[in-house]
Amino acid sequence: MKAQLKVVEYNFEASEFEWEIAPGKMIGAWGFNKQIPGPELRADIGDTLVVRVTNNLTEPTMIHWHGLRIPSAMDGTGVVQKPIEPGETFEYRFVVPDAGTFWYHSHHNETAQMERGMYGALIVEDKSELVTDSERIFMIDDMKLDSDNRFTKPGWFIPRVIERHDGRQGDTLLLNGKENTVISINGGQTERWRFINSSSARYFLLHMEGREFKIIGTDGGLLEHPRLANEVLITPGERMDIVAGPFNEGEIFAIESLPYNRVTFLKPKREKFATVKVGESKPSIAFIPETLREIETLAQQYAKVTRNIKLSVGPSMKDGMSFLVNNDVHVNDKPVRVGELQIWEINNASLMDHPFHLHGFFFQVIEEDGKAPSFKAWKDTYNLRPRTKIKIAWMPDNRPGLWMYHCHIIEHHAAGMMANFEVIDDSKPSEENARNHSATCHT
């Protein structure tokens, strides 16, 4: 019998509050419902999600639903929504069409609001043969604090340029809003761990002191087949689902990030985020099938390119450097049409990494530096290494409106590495002319 679809409702308050990230260590946080991360949202595929956001901050805010294929008016960016002013309430309402690990975060003054804690997880579930003994969500973050546990502000010109170049990356390491987390798991158990990189700029090279795990999903849900690994890179904005365990009773090991050189002033190093302690063994009911699902191929490697995008870094008299899309900042790119397959070639012409994020749509990487990928996946965020070209395929479905793509290092986005574009349905008036009629705030 078909499951009954439902309306799932949440109420959010955005506010400033004191948050304890470690015993006796308090910070002045911003967030939703006075917690970091914000409330964990859960719905089943096809449900209608309703989130009412009341803004009790002293500045405007709005929420982007990262990875969700929802209407343009609900995407939570400044081109489709009037910011929620202090004292106002706005209602987000949309159907969640895909199962997977998603998240939400502020998309206004992101460099400040996201780092202070304005983010949370959103899980959409569907029936699957996959069975695990338990499930956890791990939101990766860091904060840049001074000796009094206050958020730092870059001072004179050179520190500002360095932070603009590297992105804001701090030494206070958080997993689910806490430092030095201890995770208890029973021996013999197999768990699904959903990792979400909610940091401004940190590249997280997941490692568990050499223990193997199975990668089962990424941004757009499950892969076709589990992939055995002992490390995996999770870039800002990206998600990775793994199957962890079984471990032996009495084991103790770290969840850590190995050094990854993304070409920054800050030297990469090995860093510990949490400790896993394995307790008493229990029987397992886990079942991890060899085939998780089928993913339809959108296009082949040799498909004709419909758009070229160049990411680069250039000099700026004001700020030392600008982050560019096709040699410009904050670009208005050409429209695309509903139902016309898109093959975009994205060229990272710079000497540093950039995680490319496309709002509102999943894509498949069909080529990287002339080679086809070894497996298929639906993505919305993908890392481009220096001097690397990728070719992606995606289909604009019938959700006309204004969308964007950008580097998900938040400081690079703010410094210009982003573009808006319109999805056009030729049978309807242009969203460019009609967008002011959608998604307005109310008190």
Image (cartoon, rainbow, N blue to C red):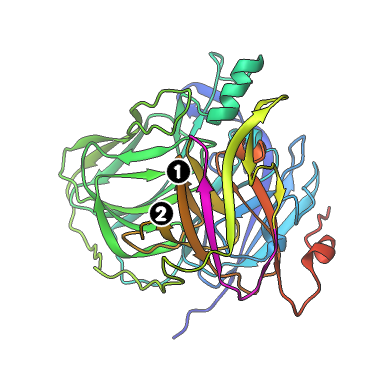
Assess disc 2: are there few (<14), some (14-19) or many (≥20) residues with their C-alpha within 10 Å of its C-alpha: some
Question: Do callouts 1 and 2 mark residues in contact (Cβ within 8 Å)?
Answer: no
Residue 130 is a magenta residue: no
Residue 386 image position (x, y, % from top left): 45, 39
Name which of mark 1 and mark 2 comes first in the sequence: 1
Q: Residue furthest bottom?
A: 1
Query: What span is in magenta?
Result: 334-351
Q: Is residue 272 above or below residue 86?
A: above
Label 1 neighbourhood size at 10 Å, few (<14), some (14-19), many (20+)? many
Q: Count of labels shown?
A: 2
Residue matched to label 1: 235
Give left or right: position of 11 versus 217: right
Tell me where residue 119 appears, x and y as whole percent.
Answer: 57, 44
Say above or below: 340 vs 148: below
Give the residue at mark 2. Answer: 368
Above or below for 244 versus 180? below
Q: Nearer the viewer, residue 264 or 362?
A: 264
Could you say whether the residue bearing mark 1 is in a helix, strand or loop?
loop
